[in-house]
Image: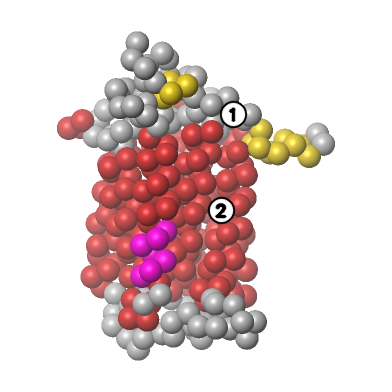
Amino acid sequence: MLLAIPFPAFDPVALSLGPISIKWYGLAYAVGIGFALWYTMRLARNTGTRPTPDDLSDFLIWAAAGILVGGRLGSVLFYNLDAYLADPLEIFRVWHGGMSFHGGLTGVIVAIIAFSLRRGFSPFALGDLVACAAPVGLLLGRLANFVNGELWGRPTDVPWAMIFPTGGDIPRHPSQLYQAGMEGLILFAILFFLARSPTVRARTGTLSGCFLIGYAIARIIGELFRQPDAQLGFLMFGTTMGQLLSLPMLAAGLWMVWRAPFGTPVAAPVEGADGKKA
């Protein structure tokens, strides 16, 4: 067996409050959604247009519902349909795990469109704000995958290979960390700097499109190191389900950037009345 870094013995429970135990994945969801609300409200505070911080506060429950319902349905339809058809009640046993990013994204997009039309402003305007915050949730989710020792990488002989508890005695890529870096840190940094450009923010839909393009590229690259889901394996031309589902994202992102209208530049983040930068 090749030399490899042993997987750290993480406690699967992040927090214990009396009889209540909060696991890492649940904590990642809670912190990610909380950060998204805080960050999008700060971005919206200086635009002078809809959506306003109050709109975003009201959108929180819509976003959470879109993530949970869409993520679960995506897992059912894209990854484990046969198993769920054999035991349909398993669909509702969310504590057993099973969430799909692409399904969650679809759920959030539906929530964005429905909420924006109900409030009377452009879905692209709301989507731009949500897109800027989303990478932090992705970062936390991938770190939770790593802590849980799941969704590990393909066999490798790189010096930083790890032996995962459920991956056999085979050194593997810590692909969760690769994806956390690309889908989380790098994508957040790109959108952070783009969002500070008045010209970019004036082209409503550009930030949303850039998020879709950036995530799709990061996911396609990350899947080259990640072990395919056991029940699916490799698909056509040696691709994975994650890569195939990312292709429509890439096409949609390119279209959104191309169609984004030029307009009057919005104000760049400035000092607010509280002395803090928005």
Task: Give the magenta-colored segment's residue range.
Answer: 188-194
Q: Residue furthest top?
A: 1
Q: Secondary structure at mark 2?
A: helix
Residue on which disc 2 sits: 32
Counting other residues with Cα less than 10 Å from the Cα at mark 2, is it few (<14), some (14-19), or many (20 or more)? many
**Amino acid type at mark 1:** Phe
Residue 181: horizontal and vertical position, in percent? 40, 47
Q: Is residue 70 in view from this perspective?
A: no
Residue on which disc 1 sits: 10
Give the spatial CA distance, label 2 vs label 1.
Answer: 21 Å
4 vs 29, nearest the viewer: 4
- Taking the image as shown, residue 214 lies to the left or right of residue 274, namely left
189 within the magenta span: yes
Q: What residue is rendered at 36% in x and 48% in y?
A: 182
Assign the C terminus to one quadrant of the image: bottom right
Counting other residues with Cα less than 10 Å from the Cα at mark 1, is it few (<14), some (14-19), or many (20 or more)? few
Residue 263: horizontal and vertical position, in percent? 32, 86
User: Total of numbered circles in the picture?
Assistant: 2
- Taking the image as shown, residue 208 lies to the left or right of residue 13, namely left
Q: What residue is rendered at 50% in x and 28% in y?
A: 149
**Amino acid type at mark 2:** Gly
Residue 125: horizontal and vertical position, in percent? 43, 74
Residue 97 lies, with reference to residue 48, above or below; the image says above
Disc 2 to disc 1: CB gap under 8 Å: no
234 within the magenta span: no
